Image (cartoon, rainbow, N blue to C red):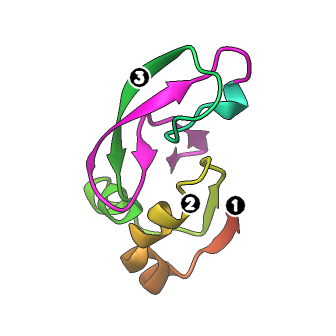
Amino acid sequence: MYREGLIIPVQKGLGDEGCDWEILLNEENSGAHSYVFQGNGSHVETIHITTIDNFVEENHLQRVDFIKADIEGAERDMLRGATKVLKIFAPKLAICT
């Protein structure tokens, strides 16, 4: 989230619904944390998932200019949870798949 020149990290995941997910944390490669349980992993952690639409509404954001996502296979879910934001704000997208 961006306010007054600051970027504020928010410890939530993005998807197509609000829920809790278990993710597999990989101690050998932090870039390999995933909600898909394959390969090596050290332990499981539960994270809260929200939609971009809900996040924007709950935080009273007046605009969304850019969405960047590299979320290990959940990009389509994230986009399904952003339909209002995509229609209203038409942000630029940088999506890794």
* Element marked by disc 2: helix
Q: Which residue is the site of mark 2? A: 75
Q: Which residue is the site of mark 3? A: 45
- Labels 1 & 3 near each other (Cβ < 8 A): no
User: Residue 28 vs residue 42: left or right?
Assistant: right
How much space separates mark 1 and mark 3, taking CA atoms?
A: 23 Å
Binning the other alpha carbons within 10 Å of mark 1 as few (below 14), some (14 to 19) or many (20 upward) gives few
* Element marked by disc 1: loop
x%, y% of residue 35?
49, 40
Which mark is on residue 84? none
Q: Which residue is the site of mark 1? A: 97
How much space separates mark 2 and mark 1, taking CA atoms?
A: 7 Å
Q: Is residue 95 magenta?
A: no
User: Residue 64 vs residue 31: left or right?
Assistant: left
Magenta residues span 1-29
**Viewer-proximal residue, 33 or 91?**
33
